Amino acid sequence: QVQLVESGGGLVQPGGSLTLACTSSGSIFTIWTMAWHRQAPGKQRELVAHITNTPNTFYAEAVKGRFTISRDLAKNTVYLQMNNLQPEDTGTYFCHADNRPRWEVWGQGTLVTVSS
């Protein structure tokens, strides 16, 4: 399995943009699905977007048209480009490598705060 390190979180004003990066310690080419989840204070963790090894992408309704997930196989990195951020996008964003049934790995999370 791999280790994941997220980066790119921070404070941004409503309407602003951020790009999150999730870098894997090993190749992501054969991992079934790489995903971004988020957890707002007091709420359950939810799926934001994922990209498969095909690659196909999926987005939660709340972020469609604003967020884009992509990957750079040469850098073993998955990105989440987030545009037109809103206060409800605030939360800790977690990267997830899903290679079940063999293994799955979570990153430590990166905090995104959208506030004026």
Image (cartoon, helix red, strand yellow):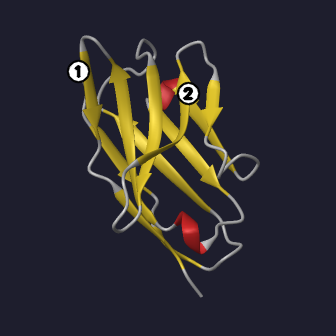
Which percent across, then down, holds residue 10? 46, 71
**Of the residues under marks 1 and 2, which one precedes in the sequence?**
1
What residue is drawn where x is 50% and y is 25%? 74
Quadrant in which residue 3 is drawn: top left
> Could you tell me which secondary element the residue under label 1 belongs to?
loop
In depth, the one of 38 and 12 nearer the eye is: 38
Q: Give the residue at the far front of this rendering.
A: 43
Amino acid type, residue under disc 1 in the picture: Gln
Which percent across, then down, holds residue 79? 54, 42
Quadrant location of the N terminus in the rendered image: top left
In depth, the one of 18 and 101 nearer the eye is: 101
Which percent across, then down, holds residue 75? 47, 31
Q: Residues within 10 Å of mark 2 (few under 14, many from 20)?
A: many
Amino acid type, residue under disc 2 in the picture: Ile
Quadrant location of the C terminus in the rendered image: bottom right
Give the residue pinned by disc 2. 51
Give the residue pinned by disc 1. 1
Q: Residues within 10 Å of mark 1 (few under 14, many from 20)?
A: some
What residue is drawn where x is 50% and y is 36%? 78
Which percent across, then down, holds residue 64? 71, 46
| CA separation in Å, label 1 and label 2 | 18 Å
